Amino acid sequence: LITIRTSRWQHGSLPTSNTTLLMRSIMAKKDTIPMKGAGTQFFRLKDEKETTAIQGGTISAAEIKKAENWERIAKIKELSPGEVTAESYEDNYLDDPNAEWKSTSQGAKSAGETSITLAWLPGDTAQQAIVTDFDSGKKKFYLVVYPNGTRDVYFAWVSSLGKAVPQNETMTRTIKLTNVGKPLLAETNQAGD
């Protein structure tokens, strides 16, 4: 609440001097204001936390919020979280009122791929763990924490590892994660935002 004290009012405004007005806060929630991506962080669920953090094949909001469950993947230059899409299928019937017009319905959904470009640090334990994940083909939970404090969680397997070696810039590692199942998106608050 905001308190406003006034000693004088213009004609046509609120009636008396020294009136206290109580107003609802006009400041919007931090997750409803557009912001830049600087400060976004990316994490991988630690191997040793899988048995305690994952229950029934999923991870709870309480476990998502525990910093000790996650290993930070640092020096990110670019991050493109998975694009959630749905296939379509034809849903036409001979006796439809407008049978000459095509009708479709939503089919199978996909959480897409997450793409990450980061500074290549071959001695970094988090980057080494991602290479191990690629070698094993194991699915892992990955967490994106945005500057406004909201989170997305994806269950994914590493589908691609690459490098770029430019002449006068930092060498980078590119990683693609193929997301599996339904992600926990910030918009649905399933990641405990």
Image (cartoon, rainbow, N blue to C red):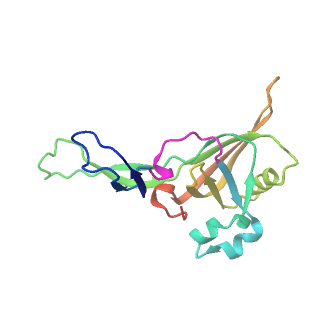
Main SS of the magenta part reads loop
x and y percent of residue 69 in the render? 71, 66
Indicate yes or no whether the magenta region holds residue 36. Answer: yes
How far across and how far down the image is residue 87, in percent? 41, 49
Near-viewer residue (23 or 125):
23
Which residue is rendered at x = 56% and y = 58% of the image?
A: 180
The quarter in which the N terminus is drawn is bottom left
Q: Quadrant of residue 59?
A: bottom right
In the depicted view, which residue is nearer to us: 140 or 63?
63
Left or right of 96, for residue 155: right
Q: Report whether 58 appears left or right of 32.
A: right
Number of disc labels: 0
Viewer-side residue, 101 vs 185: 185
Q: Residue at x 23, y 39 (%)?
A: 11
Q: In this orientation, does residue 86 appear?
A: yes
* Magenta-drawn segment: 28-40
- Measured as percent of width and height from the top left, residue 91 is found at 27, 52
Q: Which residue lies furthest to the right in this view?
A: 123
* Left or right: 154 in relation to 182: right
Residue at the extreme left:
97
State the residue at coordinates (58%, 54%). Answer: 149
Tell me, yes or no, if residue 59 can be seen here: no
Q: Is residue 157 magenta?
A: no
> What residue is at 44 percent from the left and 50 percent from the top?
28
Return the x and y of residue 17 as percentages of the image width and height: 31, 50
